[in-house]
Amino acid sequence: MTVPTATASDPTWWRQAAVYQIYPRSFADANGDGIGDLRGVTSRVPYLSALGVDAVWLSPFYPSALADGGYDVDDPRGVDPRIGTLEDFDAMVTALHGAGIRVVVDIVPNHSSDRHAWFRAALAAGPGSPERERYIFRDGLGENGELPPADWTSAFGGPAWTRVEDGQWYLHTFATEQPDYNWAHPEVREDFLTTLRFWADRGVDGFRVDVANSLAKDLPAVLPSAAELSAMPKDGTHPLWDRDEVHEIYAEWRRVFDEYDPPRTAVAEAWVDSPERRARYASPEGLGQAFNFDLLVADPEAGAFRRIITANLEQSALSGSSSTWVLSNHDVVRHATRYGLPPLEGRREKQGTAWLAEGGPEEGIDRERGLRLARAATLVELALPGSAYLFQGEELGLHEVAEIPDADRQDPAFFRTTPEDRGFDGVGRDGCRVPLPWTREGSSFGFGAGGAHLPQPAWFGGSSVQAEDGVPGSTLELYREALRLRRELQGAEELTWAEGIDGGDVLAFERPGGWLTVANLGAEGTPLPAGELLLASGPLEAAADGSAVLPAGTTAWIRR
Ligand code: GLC
Ligand code: CA
Protein backbone atom coordinates (compact mmCIF):
# COMPACT_ATOMS: atom_id res chain seq x y z
CA MET A 1 0.00 0.00 0.00
CA THR A 2 1.40 3.39 -0.92
CA VAL A 3 0.43 6.39 1.13
CA PRO A 4 0.94 9.71 -0.62
CA THR A 5 3.60 11.94 0.86
CA ALA A 6 2.65 15.25 2.39
CA THR A 7 3.31 17.35 -0.67
CA ALA A 8 4.53 14.86 -3.19
CA SER A 9 5.89 17.47 -5.53
CA ASP A 10 8.65 19.04 -3.43
CA PRO A 11 11.92 17.10 -3.55
CA THR A 12 13.75 19.71 -1.47
CA TRP A 13 11.45 19.76 1.56
CA TRP A 14 14.17 18.43 3.85
CA ARG A 15 16.72 21.17 3.18
CA GLN A 16 15.32 23.61 5.71
CA ALA A 17 12.86 21.48 7.63
CA ALA A 18 12.13 21.70 11.33
CA VAL A 19 12.14 18.05 12.35
CA TYR A 20 10.68 17.00 15.70
CA GLN A 21 12.09 13.86 17.25
CA ILE A 22 9.57 11.58 18.92
CA TYR A 23 10.83 8.96 21.33
CA PRO A 24 7.74 6.78 20.93
CA ARG A 25 7.79 5.08 24.34
CA SER A 26 7.83 8.44 26.09
CA PHE A 27 5.61 10.67 23.98
CA ALA A 28 1.95 9.74 24.58
CA ASP A 29 0.35 6.56 25.87
CA ALA A 30 -3.06 5.91 24.31
CA ASN A 31 -3.92 2.66 26.11
CA GLY A 32 -2.69 3.52 29.58
CA ASP A 33 -0.11 0.75 30.00
CA GLY A 34 2.65 3.21 30.88
CA ILE A 35 4.40 2.94 27.50
CA GLY A 36 3.93 5.48 24.76
CA ASP A 37 2.50 4.12 21.53
CA LEU A 38 1.71 4.94 17.90
CA ARG A 39 -1.93 5.69 18.66
CA GLY A 40 -0.62 8.15 21.20
CA VAL A 41 1.34 9.88 18.43
CA THR A 42 -1.73 9.93 16.21
CA SER A 43 -3.78 11.48 19.01
CA ARG A 44 -1.26 14.33 19.23
CA VAL A 45 -1.14 15.24 15.55
CA PRO A 46 -3.15 18.42 16.26
CA TYR A 47 -0.52 19.38 18.83
CA LEU A 48 2.33 18.79 16.37
CA SER A 49 0.47 20.68 13.71
CA ALA A 50 -0.10 23.68 16.02
CA LEU A 51 3.56 23.55 17.00
CA GLY A 52 4.42 24.03 13.35
CA VAL A 53 6.98 21.32 12.64
CA ASP A 54 7.60 20.12 9.09
CA ALA A 55 8.41 16.51 9.92
CA VAL A 56 8.65 14.06 12.77
CA TRP A 57 11.43 11.55 13.24
CA LEU A 58 10.43 8.50 15.25
CA SER A 59 13.09 6.69 17.24
CA PRO A 60 12.74 2.89 16.93
CA PHE A 61 9.29 1.38 17.50
CA TYR A 62 10.28 -2.07 16.21
CA PRO A 63 9.91 -5.27 18.22
CA SER A 64 12.63 -5.19 20.83
CA ALA A 65 13.51 -6.43 24.30
CA LEU A 66 14.54 -2.82 25.06
CA ALA A 67 18.08 -3.63 26.05
CA ASP A 68 18.90 -0.26 24.46
CA GLY A 69 15.59 1.57 24.34
CA GLY A 70 14.60 -0.10 21.06
CA TYR A 71 17.94 0.36 19.28
CA ASP A 72 18.19 -3.40 19.75
CA VAL A 73 15.92 -4.41 16.89
CA ASP A 74 14.38 -7.90 16.71
CA ASP A 75 12.60 -7.30 13.43
CA PRO A 76 13.18 -4.12 11.43
CA ARG A 77 9.95 -4.56 9.47
CA GLY A 78 7.54 -4.81 12.35
CA VAL A 79 6.01 -2.78 15.18
CA ASP A 80 6.54 -3.75 18.80
CA PRO A 81 3.18 -5.08 20.02
CA ARG A 82 3.48 -2.86 23.11
CA ILE A 83 3.69 0.16 20.80
CA GLY A 84 1.08 -0.82 18.26
CA THR A 85 0.57 -2.58 14.96
CA LEU A 86 1.40 -1.91 11.32
CA GLU A 87 -2.19 -0.72 10.92
CA ASP A 88 -1.59 1.82 13.70
CA PHE A 89 1.55 2.87 11.87
CA ASP A 90 -0.34 3.41 8.62
CA ALA A 91 -3.04 5.37 10.45
CA MET A 92 -0.37 7.53 12.07
CA VAL A 93 1.32 8.25 8.73
CA THR A 94 -2.02 9.13 7.17
CA ALA A 95 -2.85 11.50 10.03
CA LEU A 96 0.57 13.17 9.94
CA HIS A 97 0.51 13.53 6.17
CA GLY A 98 -2.99 14.89 6.41
CA ALA A 99 -1.60 17.63 8.61
CA GLY A 100 1.26 18.29 6.16
CA ILE A 101 3.86 16.68 8.45
CA ARG A 102 6.40 14.31 6.94
CA VAL A 103 7.57 11.11 8.59
CA VAL A 104 11.14 9.97 9.18
CA VAL A 105 11.90 6.59 10.75
CA ASP A 106 15.07 5.31 12.39
CA ILE A 107 17.13 2.64 10.62
CA VAL A 108 19.59 0.72 12.81
CA PRO A 109 22.11 -0.91 10.49
CA ASN A 110 25.18 -1.50 12.66
CA HIS A 111 23.57 -4.23 14.72
CA SER A 112 20.46 -6.27 15.28
CA SER A 113 19.28 -7.49 18.64
CA ASP A 114 20.31 -10.88 19.96
CA ARG A 115 16.67 -11.95 19.48
CA HIS A 116 16.70 -11.31 15.72
CA ALA A 117 15.93 -14.49 13.74
CA TRP A 118 19.36 -14.31 12.07
CA PHE A 119 21.23 -14.13 15.34
CA ARG A 120 19.26 -17.02 16.81
CA ALA A 121 20.02 -19.01 13.68
CA ALA A 122 23.69 -18.11 14.02
CA LEU A 123 23.75 -19.40 17.57
CA ALA A 124 21.92 -22.58 16.65
CA ALA A 125 24.04 -23.35 13.60
CA GLY A 126 27.37 -23.20 15.40
CA PRO A 127 30.93 -22.19 14.55
CA GLY A 128 31.93 -22.09 10.91
CA SER A 129 28.32 -22.11 9.65
CA PRO A 130 27.08 -19.73 6.95
CA GLU A 131 24.59 -18.41 9.54
CA ARG A 132 27.45 -17.05 11.63
CA GLU A 133 28.80 -15.14 8.66
CA ARG A 134 26.08 -12.50 8.94
CA TYR A 135 27.60 -11.38 12.23
CA ILE A 136 31.16 -11.02 13.46
CA PHE A 137 32.17 -14.18 15.25
CA ARG A 138 35.73 -15.08 16.24
CA ASP A 139 37.49 -17.73 18.24
CA GLY A 140 38.89 -16.54 21.53
CA LEU A 141 42.50 -16.27 22.58
CA GLY A 142 44.20 -18.28 25.32
CA GLU A 143 44.70 -22.01 25.49
CA ASN A 144 41.03 -22.86 25.23
CA GLY A 145 39.74 -19.73 23.60
CA GLU A 146 38.66 -18.49 27.01
CA LEU A 147 39.98 -14.97 26.43
CA PRO A 148 38.18 -12.47 24.16
CA PRO A 149 39.64 -11.99 20.66
CA ALA A 150 40.60 -8.46 21.76
CA ASP A 151 40.36 -6.32 24.89
CA TRP A 152 37.99 -3.79 23.29
CA THR A 153 35.44 -1.84 25.27
CA SER A 154 31.88 -1.29 24.01
CA ALA A 155 30.58 2.24 23.46
CA PHE A 156 28.49 1.80 26.62
CA GLY A 157 31.43 0.52 28.69
CA GLY A 158 32.21 -3.11 29.47
CA PRO A 159 33.64 -5.62 26.97
CA ALA A 160 32.81 -5.44 23.26
CA TRP A 161 33.14 -9.22 22.76
CA THR A 162 30.83 -11.76 24.38
CA ARG A 163 31.29 -15.52 24.45
CA VAL A 164 28.49 -17.84 23.40
CA GLU A 165 27.86 -21.36 24.68
CA ASP A 166 29.93 -23.20 22.10
CA GLY A 167 32.94 -21.06 22.96
CA GLN A 168 33.04 -18.56 20.08
CA TRP A 169 32.85 -14.81 20.66
CA TYR A 170 30.85 -12.14 18.83
CA LEU A 171 31.49 -8.44 18.47
CA HIS A 172 29.05 -5.87 19.80
CA THR A 173 30.08 -2.23 19.55
CA PHE A 174 27.21 -1.38 21.89
CA ALA A 175 25.37 -3.56 24.45
CA THR A 176 25.76 -7.34 24.68
CA GLU A 177 22.27 -7.66 23.21
CA GLN A 178 23.33 -5.75 20.06
CA PRO A 179 25.50 -8.05 17.89
CA ASP A 180 27.20 -6.17 15.03
CA TYR A 181 26.24 -7.21 11.52
CA ASN A 182 28.87 -8.25 9.01
CA TRP A 183 28.33 -5.74 6.21
CA ALA A 184 30.63 -7.66 3.89
CA HIS A 185 27.79 -10.19 3.64
CA PRO A 186 25.52 -9.68 0.62
CA GLU A 187 22.41 -10.86 2.50
CA VAL A 188 22.89 -8.17 5.12
CA ARG A 189 23.10 -5.55 2.39
CA GLU A 190 20.09 -6.91 0.55
CA ASP A 191 17.99 -7.14 3.69
CA PHE A 192 18.46 -3.48 4.47
CA LEU A 193 17.39 -2.52 0.96
CA THR A 194 14.25 -4.57 1.60
CA THR A 195 13.70 -2.70 4.87
CA LEU A 196 14.14 0.70 3.24
CA ARG A 197 11.62 -0.20 0.54
CA PHE A 198 9.24 -1.67 3.09
CA TRP A 199 8.92 1.64 4.94
CA ALA A 200 9.18 3.84 1.86
CA ASP A 201 6.29 1.86 0.32
CA ARG A 202 4.26 2.60 3.46
CA GLY A 203 4.71 6.30 2.82
CA VAL A 204 7.72 7.08 5.00
CA ASP A 205 9.43 10.21 3.67
CA GLY A 206 12.90 9.73 5.10
CA PHE A 207 15.28 7.81 7.30
CA ARG A 208 17.52 8.64 10.22
CA VAL A 209 20.51 6.30 10.04
CA ASP A 210 21.84 5.14 13.38
CA VAL A 211 25.64 5.03 13.87
CA ALA A 212 26.05 5.45 10.13
CA ASN A 213 29.84 5.56 10.41
CA SER A 214 30.39 2.04 11.71
CA LEU A 215 28.94 -0.38 9.15
CA ALA A 216 32.04 -1.06 7.10
CA LYS A 217 34.67 -2.88 9.12
CA ASP A 218 37.97 -4.46 8.26
CA LEU A 219 39.21 -6.70 11.00
CA PRO A 220 42.65 -8.25 10.45
CA ALA A 221 43.34 -11.85 11.52
CA VAL A 222 45.31 -10.59 14.49
CA LEU A 223 43.24 -7.89 16.10
CA PRO A 224 44.83 -4.71 17.41
CA SER A 225 44.57 -4.04 21.13
CA ALA A 226 42.15 -1.42 22.46
CA ALA A 227 45.10 0.93 22.98
CA GLU A 228 46.34 0.40 19.42
CA LEU A 229 42.83 0.82 18.09
CA SER A 230 42.30 4.13 19.80
CA ALA A 231 45.67 5.42 18.56
CA MET A 232 44.73 4.74 14.92
CA PRO A 233 43.67 7.75 12.88
CA LYS A 234 40.04 7.91 11.81
CA ASP A 235 40.95 8.97 8.31
CA GLY A 236 39.02 6.37 6.39
CA THR A 237 41.36 3.50 7.22
CA HIS A 238 40.42 2.73 10.83
CA PRO A 239 39.33 -0.92 11.24
CA LEU A 240 36.00 0.04 12.83
CA TRP A 241 35.06 3.65 12.34
CA ASP A 242 34.29 5.88 9.38
CA ARG A 243 35.90 3.66 6.75
CA ASP A 244 35.82 5.07 3.24
CA GLU A 245 33.99 2.08 1.76
CA VAL A 246 30.95 2.69 3.97
CA HIS A 247 29.90 5.15 1.28
CA GLU A 248 29.51 2.32 -1.23
CA ILE A 249 26.70 1.07 0.97
CA TYR A 250 25.00 4.46 0.99
CA ALA A 251 25.39 4.83 -2.76
CA GLU A 252 23.27 1.66 -3.02
CA TRP A 253 20.74 3.10 -0.59
CA ARG A 254 20.59 6.29 -2.62
CA ARG A 255 19.52 4.29 -5.66
CA VAL A 256 16.61 2.95 -3.59
CA PHE A 257 15.70 6.43 -2.31
CA ASP A 258 15.65 7.70 -5.88
CA GLU A 259 13.17 5.02 -6.93
CA TYR A 260 10.56 7.15 -5.17
CA ASP A 261 8.92 10.44 -6.02
CA PRO A 262 9.93 12.58 -4.30
CA PRO A 263 13.14 10.74 -3.48
CA ARG A 264 13.23 9.50 0.08
CA THR A 265 15.67 11.40 2.26
CA ALA A 266 18.15 10.31 4.89
CA VAL A 267 20.19 11.86 7.64
CA ALA A 268 23.27 10.19 9.04
CA GLU A 269 24.11 9.96 12.68
CA ALA A 270 27.87 9.94 12.34
CA TRP A 271 30.03 11.16 15.18
CA VAL A 272 33.07 11.63 12.96
CA ASP A 273 36.19 13.65 13.52
CA SER A 274 35.67 16.68 11.29
CA PRO A 275 33.09 18.57 9.22
CA GLU A 276 35.02 17.36 6.16
CA ARG A 277 34.51 13.71 7.02
CA ARG A 278 30.90 14.38 7.93
CA ALA A 279 30.26 15.95 4.53
CA ARG A 280 30.88 12.58 2.87
CA TYR A 281 27.76 11.20 4.56
CA ALA A 282 25.78 14.25 3.48
CA SER A 283 26.72 13.87 -0.16
CA PRO A 284 23.80 13.81 -2.64
CA GLU A 285 25.17 10.47 -3.91
CA GLY A 286 24.94 9.12 -0.36
CA LEU A 287 22.56 9.74 2.49
CA GLY A 288 22.13 13.40 1.56
CA GLN A 289 22.31 14.91 5.02
CA ALA A 290 24.21 14.32 8.28
CA PHE A 291 23.70 15.44 11.83
CA ASN A 292 26.00 18.21 12.89
CA PHE A 293 26.47 17.95 16.64
CA ASP A 294 28.92 20.82 16.92
CA LEU A 295 26.46 23.20 18.59
CA LEU A 296 25.27 20.42 20.87
CA VAL A 297 28.73 19.90 22.33
CA ALA A 298 29.58 23.62 22.51
CA ASP A 299 29.06 26.13 25.27
CA PRO A 300 26.46 28.79 24.47
CA GLU A 301 29.22 31.29 23.67
CA ALA A 302 29.19 33.69 20.75
CA GLY A 303 32.75 32.87 19.68
CA ALA A 304 32.16 29.13 19.62
CA PHE A 305 28.79 29.47 17.87
CA ARG A 306 30.27 31.84 15.26
CA ARG A 307 33.08 29.45 14.38
CA ILE A 308 30.75 26.46 14.22
CA ILE A 309 28.16 28.20 12.07
CA THR A 310 30.77 29.50 9.62
CA ALA A 311 32.55 26.16 9.29
CA ASN A 312 29.39 24.14 8.82
CA LEU A 313 27.81 26.45 6.28
CA GLU A 314 31.02 26.33 4.24
CA GLN A 315 31.06 22.58 4.48
CA SER A 316 27.44 22.07 3.51
CA ALA A 317 27.87 24.36 0.53
CA LEU A 318 30.77 22.18 -0.62
CA SER A 319 28.86 18.92 -0.14
CA GLY A 320 25.72 20.14 -1.88
CA SER A 321 23.69 19.34 1.20
CA SER A 322 22.10 21.71 3.67
CA SER A 323 23.44 21.99 7.16
CA THR A 324 21.72 20.48 10.17
CA TRP A 325 21.56 21.86 13.69
CA VAL A 326 20.91 19.98 16.91
CA LEU A 327 20.83 21.14 20.52
CA SER A 328 19.13 18.16 22.16
CA ASN A 329 18.29 14.55 21.41
CA HIS A 330 17.61 11.29 23.23
CA ASP A 331 21.30 10.65 23.89
CA VAL A 332 22.33 13.81 25.73
CA VAL A 333 21.33 15.97 28.67
CA ARG A 334 18.65 18.46 27.60
CA HIS A 335 20.13 21.81 26.63
CA ALA A 336 18.09 23.76 29.20
CA THR A 337 19.91 21.75 31.85
CA ARG A 338 23.36 21.65 30.24
CA TYR A 339 23.46 25.41 30.11
CA GLY A 340 22.57 25.62 33.80
CA LEU A 341 25.30 23.34 35.07
CA PRO A 342 28.28 24.68 36.96
CA PRO A 343 31.28 25.17 34.68
CA LEU A 344 33.50 22.12 34.53
CA GLU A 345 36.84 23.22 33.18
CA GLY A 346 38.29 20.94 30.58
CA ARG A 347 35.17 18.82 30.20
CA ARG A 348 33.18 21.19 28.09
CA GLU A 349 33.78 19.34 24.86
CA LYS A 350 32.11 16.26 26.31
CA GLN A 351 28.44 15.49 26.05
CA GLY A 352 26.17 16.79 28.76
CA THR A 353 25.75 13.58 30.65
CA ALA A 354 29.29 13.80 31.95
CA TRP A 355 28.61 17.33 33.14
CA LEU A 356 25.49 16.16 34.86
CA ALA A 357 27.32 13.34 36.55
CA GLU A 358 29.80 15.83 37.94
CA GLY A 359 27.58 18.87 38.28
CA GLY A 360 24.48 17.13 39.59
CA PRO A 361 22.41 16.30 41.51
CA GLU A 362 19.53 18.68 41.10
CA GLU A 363 20.80 21.35 43.47
CA GLY A 364 23.88 21.85 41.28
CA ILE A 365 21.74 23.13 38.42
CA ASP A 366 20.85 26.78 37.84
CA ARG A 367 17.59 26.03 36.05
CA GLU A 368 16.65 29.62 35.44
CA ARG A 369 19.93 30.48 33.73
CA GLY A 370 19.90 27.21 31.81
CA LEU A 371 16.45 27.78 30.39
CA ARG A 372 17.16 31.42 29.53
CA LEU A 373 20.24 30.41 27.53
CA ALA A 374 18.43 27.45 25.98
CA ARG A 375 15.68 29.71 24.67
CA ALA A 376 18.30 32.11 23.31
CA ALA A 377 20.22 29.29 21.63
CA THR A 378 17.03 27.86 20.13
CA LEU A 379 16.21 31.16 18.43
CA VAL A 380 19.71 31.09 16.95
CA GLU A 381 19.25 27.51 15.79
CA LEU A 382 15.87 28.18 14.20
CA ALA A 383 17.19 31.19 12.32
CA LEU A 384 20.07 29.35 10.67
CA PRO A 385 19.94 28.11 7.09
CA GLY A 386 19.38 24.35 7.01
CA SER A 387 17.37 21.85 9.04
CA ALA A 388 16.75 22.05 12.76
CA TYR A 389 16.24 18.80 14.66
CA LEU A 390 14.24 19.32 17.84
CA PHE A 391 13.78 16.77 20.60
CA GLN A 392 10.36 16.19 22.17
CA GLY A 393 9.90 18.27 25.29
CA GLU A 394 12.43 20.96 24.45
CA GLU A 395 9.48 23.06 23.26
CA LEU A 396 8.31 23.00 26.88
CA GLY A 397 11.69 24.14 28.17
CA LEU A 398 11.81 20.79 29.89
CA HIS A 399 14.78 20.07 32.10
CA GLU A 400 16.66 16.82 32.40
CA VAL A 401 15.37 14.62 35.20
CA ALA A 402 18.62 14.37 37.12
CA GLU A 403 17.52 12.11 39.92
CA ILE A 404 16.22 8.74 38.83
CA PRO A 405 16.56 5.91 41.35
CA ASP A 406 19.03 3.27 40.18
CA ALA A 407 16.29 0.65 40.30
CA ASP A 408 14.25 2.58 37.72
CA ARG A 409 17.05 3.18 35.24
CA GLN A 410 16.88 1.56 31.81
CA ASP A 411 19.89 2.81 29.87
CA PRO A 412 22.54 0.12 29.28
CA ALA A 413 25.18 2.83 29.49
CA PHE A 414 24.26 3.17 33.15
CA PHE A 415 24.53 -0.51 33.91
CA ARG A 416 27.69 -1.16 31.95
CA THR A 417 29.71 1.47 33.79
CA THR A 418 30.68 2.02 37.40
CA PRO A 419 30.50 5.42 39.12
CA GLU A 420 34.32 5.54 38.91
CA ASP A 421 34.60 4.92 35.21
CA ARG A 422 31.53 6.86 34.09
CA GLY A 423 32.82 9.22 31.45
CA PHE A 424 31.13 9.99 28.18
CA ASP A 425 27.76 8.62 29.11
CA GLY A 426 27.86 9.69 32.72
CA VAL A 427 24.68 8.81 34.56
CA GLY A 428 23.10 7.46 31.41
CA ARG A 429 20.44 8.83 29.11
CA ASP A 430 17.22 8.10 30.96
CA GLY A 431 16.88 11.66 32.26
CA CYS A 432 15.88 13.06 28.86
CA ARG A 433 13.61 10.09 28.07
CA VAL A 434 11.11 10.54 30.89
CA PRO A 435 7.54 10.53 29.50
CA LEU A 436 6.28 13.98 28.52
CA PRO A 437 4.00 15.97 30.81
CA TRP A 438 0.82 17.02 28.98
CA THR A 439 -1.24 18.19 31.95
CA ARG A 440 -0.51 19.92 35.26
CA GLU A 441 -1.81 17.02 37.29
CA GLY A 442 -3.38 13.63 36.93
CA SER A 443 -2.01 10.20 36.16
CA SER A 444 1.43 10.50 34.60
CA PHE A 445 0.71 14.20 33.93
CA GLY A 446 -1.50 13.38 30.98
CA PHE A 447 1.02 11.05 29.34
CA GLY A 448 -1.58 8.31 29.69
CA ALA A 449 -4.28 6.95 31.91
CA GLY A 450 -1.77 4.73 33.71
CA GLY A 451 1.74 5.24 35.00
CA ALA A 452 4.93 6.22 33.25
CA HIS A 453 7.71 3.73 32.47
CA LEU A 454 10.30 6.15 33.89
CA PRO A 455 9.37 8.12 37.01
CA GLN A 456 8.27 11.72 36.46
CA PRO A 457 9.28 14.26 39.11
CA ALA A 458 6.71 16.41 40.93
CA TRP A 459 7.83 19.56 39.07
CA PHE A 460 6.91 18.09 35.69
CA GLY A 461 3.35 19.42 35.82
CA GLY A 462 4.63 22.99 35.89
CA SER A 463 6.36 22.37 32.55
CA SER A 464 3.41 20.61 30.98
CA VAL A 465 1.69 21.51 27.74
CA GLN A 466 -1.39 22.52 29.75
CA ALA A 467 0.65 24.84 31.97
CA GLU A 468 2.19 26.61 28.96
CA ASP A 469 -0.53 26.53 26.33
CA GLY A 470 -1.67 30.05 25.53
CA VAL A 471 0.53 31.57 28.22
CA PRO A 472 2.43 34.54 26.78
CA GLY A 473 6.16 34.15 27.21
CA SER A 474 6.00 30.39 27.87
CA THR A 475 8.58 28.28 26.10
CA LEU A 476 5.83 26.47 24.19
CA GLU A 477 4.45 29.75 22.84
CA LEU A 478 7.99 30.87 21.99
CA TYR A 479 8.56 27.73 19.90
CA ARG A 480 5.17 28.02 18.21
CA GLU A 481 5.76 31.62 17.25
CA ALA A 482 9.36 30.95 16.19
CA LEU A 483 8.35 28.03 13.98
CA ARG A 484 5.52 30.05 12.46
CA LEU A 485 7.80 32.99 11.70
CA ARG A 486 10.54 30.70 10.42
CA ARG A 487 8.20 29.32 7.77
CA GLU A 488 7.25 32.83 6.75
CA LEU A 489 10.76 34.30 6.75
CA GLN A 490 12.86 31.47 5.45
CA GLY A 491 14.22 32.03 1.98
CA ALA A 492 17.49 31.12 0.36
CA GLU A 493 20.04 29.18 2.40
CA GLU A 494 22.19 32.25 2.91
CA LEU A 495 23.58 33.97 5.94
CA THR A 496 25.63 37.17 6.30
CA TRP A 497 27.21 38.30 9.52
CA ALA A 498 25.69 41.65 10.47
CA GLU A 499 28.46 44.18 10.21
CA GLY A 500 28.64 46.63 13.06
CA ILE A 501 26.49 44.44 15.30
CA ASP A 502 28.15 41.04 15.24
CA GLY A 503 31.24 40.80 17.41
CA GLY A 504 32.47 39.80 20.84
CA ASP A 505 29.69 38.28 22.91
CA VAL A 506 27.01 39.38 20.49
CA LEU A 507 26.23 37.07 17.62
CA ALA A 508 24.34 38.77 14.81
CA PHE A 509 23.50 37.52 11.33
CA GLU A 510 21.07 38.34 8.61
CA ARG A 511 19.08 36.13 6.26
CA PRO A 512 17.73 37.31 2.92
CA GLY A 513 14.71 39.59 3.26
CA GLY A 514 16.12 41.59 6.17
CA TRP A 515 15.65 38.88 8.85
CA LEU A 516 18.18 39.82 11.51
CA THR A 517 19.02 37.60 14.47
CA VAL A 518 20.88 39.13 17.40
CA ALA A 519 21.95 36.87 20.26
CA ASN A 520 23.47 38.42 23.34
CA LEU A 521 25.44 35.56 24.84
CA GLY A 522 27.53 37.78 27.12
CA ALA A 523 27.01 38.92 30.70
CA GLU A 524 25.90 42.55 30.05
CA GLY A 525 22.97 44.06 28.19
CA THR A 526 23.53 45.40 24.68
CA PRO A 527 21.54 47.97 22.67
CA LEU A 528 18.76 46.40 20.61
CA PRO A 529 19.42 47.15 16.92
CA ALA A 530 16.84 49.22 15.02
CA GLY A 531 14.04 47.53 13.11
CA GLU A 532 10.74 45.79 13.71
CA LEU A 533 11.02 43.42 16.67
CA LEU A 534 9.51 40.11 15.59
CA LEU A 535 10.29 37.89 18.55
CA ALA A 536 12.58 37.75 21.56
CA SER A 537 13.59 34.76 23.67
CA GLY A 538 13.02 36.75 26.88
CA PRO A 539 11.86 40.15 28.12
CA LEU A 540 13.74 43.21 26.90
CA GLU A 541 14.96 46.02 29.17
CA ALA A 542 15.11 49.77 28.83
CA ALA A 543 18.22 51.96 29.16
CA ALA A 544 18.17 55.20 31.18
CA ASP A 545 17.38 57.14 27.99
CA GLY A 546 14.45 54.84 27.27
CA SER A 547 16.10 52.95 24.41
CA ALA A 548 15.60 49.17 24.24
CA VAL A 549 18.27 46.86 25.62
CA LEU A 550 18.77 43.20 24.73
CA PRO A 551 19.61 41.62 28.09
CA ALA A 552 22.30 39.01 28.67
CA GLY A 553 21.28 35.54 27.53
CA THR A 554 18.60 36.81 25.14
CA THR A 555 18.08 36.52 21.37
CA ALA A 556 15.89 38.77 19.24
CA TRP A 557 14.58 38.42 15.70
CA ILE A 558 14.24 41.76 13.95
CA ARG A 559 13.03 42.70 10.48
CA ARG A 560 14.95 45.58 8.93
C1 GLC B 1 22.86 5.79 18.45
C2 GLC B 1 21.56 6.10 19.13
C3 GLC B 1 21.64 5.63 20.54
C4 GLC B 1 21.89 4.13 20.55
C5 GLC B 1 23.13 3.78 19.74
C6 GLC B 1 23.21 2.31 19.45
O1 GLC B 1 23.90 6.52 18.97
O2 GLC B 1 21.26 7.45 19.01
O3 GLC B 1 20.49 5.93 21.27
O4 GLC B 1 22.07 3.71 21.87
O5 GLC B 1 23.12 4.42 18.49
O6 GLC B 1 22.21 1.92 18.57
CA1 CA C 1 0.70 2.27 25.59
Image (tube, rainbow, N blue to C red):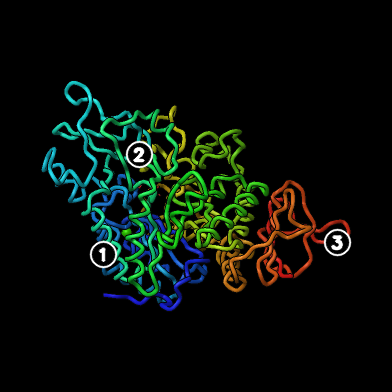
Q: Position of residue 102 (x, y in %)?
A: 42, 69
Residue 219 appears left or right of 301: left
Structural distance between the alpha carbons of marks 2 and 1: 39 Å
Q: Amino acid at mark 1?
A: Thr
Which quadrant of the view contains residue 472? Answer: bottom right
The residue beneath circle 1 is 85
Q: Amino acid at mark 3?
A: Gly
Please name the residue shown 74% across and 52% down the image.
503
Q: Which label sits on residue 234?
A: none
The residue beneath circle 2 is 239
The residue beneath circle 3 is 546
Q: Position of residue 349 (x, y in %)?
A: 55, 40
Q: Position of residue 434 (x, y in %)?
A: 43, 50
Disc 1 element: loop
First in sequence, mark 2 or 1: give its number: 1
Structural distance between the alpha carbons of marks 3 and 1: 60 Å
Q: Residues within 10 Å of mark 1 (few under 14, many from 20)?
A: some
Q: Residues within 10 Å of mark 3 (few under 14, many from 20)?
A: few
